Image (cartoon, grey):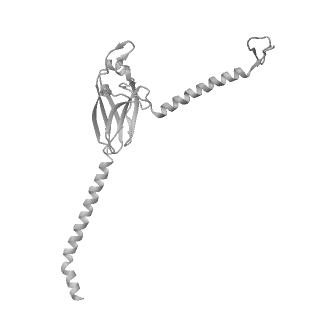
Amino acid sequence: MENVLEVLDRYSTLMSGISTLGIAILTAFLWFENRALRKAGSSPDVVAYILPHPEGSGAVEFILANVGRGPAFDVVFQFDCDEDDFSAHNVLLENDKDRMPMSVIPQGEKVKSLFGISFELYGKLSDQDIGPLKRFTVDITYKDALGRTHRGKRIIDIKQFSGLRGILAKSPSAKSAETLDRMEKHLQAISRQVGRYVSLIDVTEIADQHRQKRKGDSKP
């Protein structure tokens, strides 16, 4: 028993040091892990781009998307563009001095707005062809969850869609909606015709060359 106590006493300092080192390593690991988690939740990345409307209506949408990690707060965007060119191409989204910052764009979410009509953005206006909309820059400012300010720039050019066929194709849901709408109109027309014929009474006489009909509320 005394030998065991002597051994423990002899190595107690070493065991205490090993224990302290283990605790220090665990603490450091937890600190780095916690730091990585905080960073993962505070690294938003807001980008801007344009895309044809998914329903194939011919509209073009302007999109702000948060493709980073963590929410983006107080999001502000501004067009650096030729305003006369925007006006000539009937761009529907312009710089607005009354527009306030967007409170938040959550991670993986996006905000959409109608930007213009595809052929007008390409300069096909009535009988004129003024050429495509000039490229422009979108300046973006936002804050992360820690209150840090981020800034970014995105260059947008409508000519990125040149030569791409089928990008204005209608989605299956849009096609189904149009089919149902046409069916409804046909049924309404049939209903009106049926109602008209139901109210007619055959008054044909044997000497008549053609069938004679009168409304049900008419006197023979």
Q: Position of residue 22 (x, y in %)?
A: 24, 67
Residue at image coords 66%, 25%: 191
Residue 50 at x, y = what percent?
35, 30
Quadrant in which the N terminus appears: bottom left
Q: Is residue 134 left or right of residue 181?
A: left
Give the position of the C terminus as an image quadrant: top right
Residue 95 vertical position relative to residue 30 in the rendered view, above or below? above
Query: Depth check: 123 or 11 in front?
Result: 123
Horizontal side of 105 relative to 201 (left or right) equals left
Name which quarter of the figure residue 202 lies in. Answer: top right
* Place of residue 34 in the rendered image (x, y in percent of width and height, measured from the top left): 30, 55
Q: How many marks?
A: 0
- Residue 168 in the figure: left or right of residue 194: left
Q: Nearer the viewer, residue 181 or 108?
A: 181
Outermost bottom residue? 1
Considering only vertical position in the picture, is 122 above or below 171? above
> Residue at image x 19%, y 75%?
13
Q: Nearer the viewer, residue 185 or 96?
A: 185
171 or 72, which lies in front? 171
Say which residue appears at 29% left-offset and 56% top-offset: 33
Reply above or below: 97 against 148: above
